Each structure stands twice: as C-alpha cells, then as structure tokens.
Amino acid sequence: MPVDTEGVREKLNWLVNEKKIPVVTFNSDIVGTKRCCFVGMDNKLSGQTAAGLFGMMTRGVGKILVITGYFSSMLNNSRVDGFVEEIKNISPKLEIAGVQGSFNNADEVEHIIENAMMSISGINGIFVVSGGQEGIVEAFRKLGVEQRPYVVIYDQTAKNETLLKEGTADFLIDQNGFEQGYRPPRILADILLNGTYPDTEYLYTGIDIKTKYNL
C-alpha cells in the first residue's frame, strides 16, 4: 500500500516535531518529512538496471509493456522513471507500450498483459515493477504464446523463484528484504540509546540480479 500521501506525511512530521519520536522509513520512502533516514533499494537505479537488461535481451528494438503497482507509490514511480529515462538514453528504438497500474493484484497483471498483447503488436518485453507477478503465467497460458516476451520482475519470493525456474521470467531484481527489516530497528536503537544518528540520509541495501541459475 502506498504511503506517499499527505495524511501520512503530516502524521510522521507530527511524531517528529511534537512527540520527538525519531522516524526511519524503509522499503518505500516519503518526501517532505523529517524522517532521519531511508533504508531500502535505490529504486531509480534499479529501474535503470532493468532498462539495461531489456536493452541487451531485445538488442534495443521492440516494445516494452510496463506494469506498476500504484501510481501513488514513490517506490513504484521511481522504478518506472529510472527505467523510462534509461531506455531513452541507451535504446531509443525501444518503445514503451504503456505504463499500467495493477494494484499489486495478480488478476490485474493477467488482464493487463492479455489486453495489451491482443491490441498492441510487437510487444517483446514485460517489466513488472511491483507485486502480482504470478498473473504473468496465466496470461501467457490464455494467450497461447509460442515465444513469450522477455520478462523482468522484482523481489526474491518463493513464487517469483518459481517463475524463474519454470522459464516464465528471465531476470529478477531483489532488494534484500531481510536487510530492510533488520537495519531500521538497529538504527532506532542507536538513536534512542546512544544518541547516534546515521551518517547519511539514504542507506541503500543493494541491487541483486537473479536468474534461475543463481537463486
């Protein structure tokens, strides 16, 4: 669920200003707050990374369908922005065949892929920046594709590992969810117990590229 909303922003600033409670954001950041730091993936850079992967797989020619989760999510938007910007830079002949929101729902992902591939010719890549990736399988089955588009997804979950192993997806970009859960409590403990704040505002957890061979 996206958190980059005015209501959440006001509440976080109230906690910091009025209650003197330190705030650390993780996974998805929120602009305009007085949180002390963000722990998570450099989402824009991860989108640029995905653009590089598609550029290599397609040899810079074709059409890429982009499926995001929520248009109100800073995390999703950063990934899409990085992807689109880098595609324009490195593969100007690669077209973006639309950016559509799935609400992280597998059925929506399925319908988006079905409708796009039936109405737009030449789609040879699908980039799913958020959840609902398992909908790709059913979409390909219903479409009866003989040669599927190249697929890049996010997050090393058991279901997504299956997509790689079974050949539904080519690459998975992982954001180290364990580190995102482990580091924020440690940071808050240092602040509360020792008065020690992080040296930097952005504590990135890395970008890991997975295939079926290195899970």
Image (tube, grey):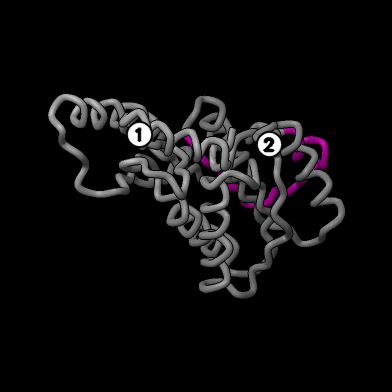
Query: Which image quadrant: the C terminus?
Result: top left
Q: Vertically, is 135 above or below 91?
A: above
Residue 209 visible in image:
yes
Q: Earlier in the sequence, mark 1 or mark 2?
A: 1
Mark 2 surroundings: few (<14), some (14-19) or many (≥20) residues within 10 A: some
Q: Position of residue 8 (x, y in %)?
A: 53, 35
Above or below, 14 against 84 in this view is above
Determine the secondary structure under disc 2.
loop
Q: CA distance from mark 1 to mark 2?
A: 27 Å
Q: Position of residue 111 (x, y in %)?
A: 80, 39
Q: Which residue occupies the extreme right position in the image? A: 119
Closest to the observer: 124 or 17?
A: 17
Within the magenta stretch, is there residue 147?
Answer: yes
Mark 2 — residue?
A: 103
Mark 1 or mark 2, which is nearer to you?
A: 1
Q: Is residue 131 above or below residue 98?
A: above
Name the image quarter holding residue 198.
top left
The residues colored magenta run 138-155
* Image position of 70 with respect to 124: above or below: above
Residue position marked by numbered label 1 in the rendering? 23
Quadrant of the drawing holding the N terminus: top right
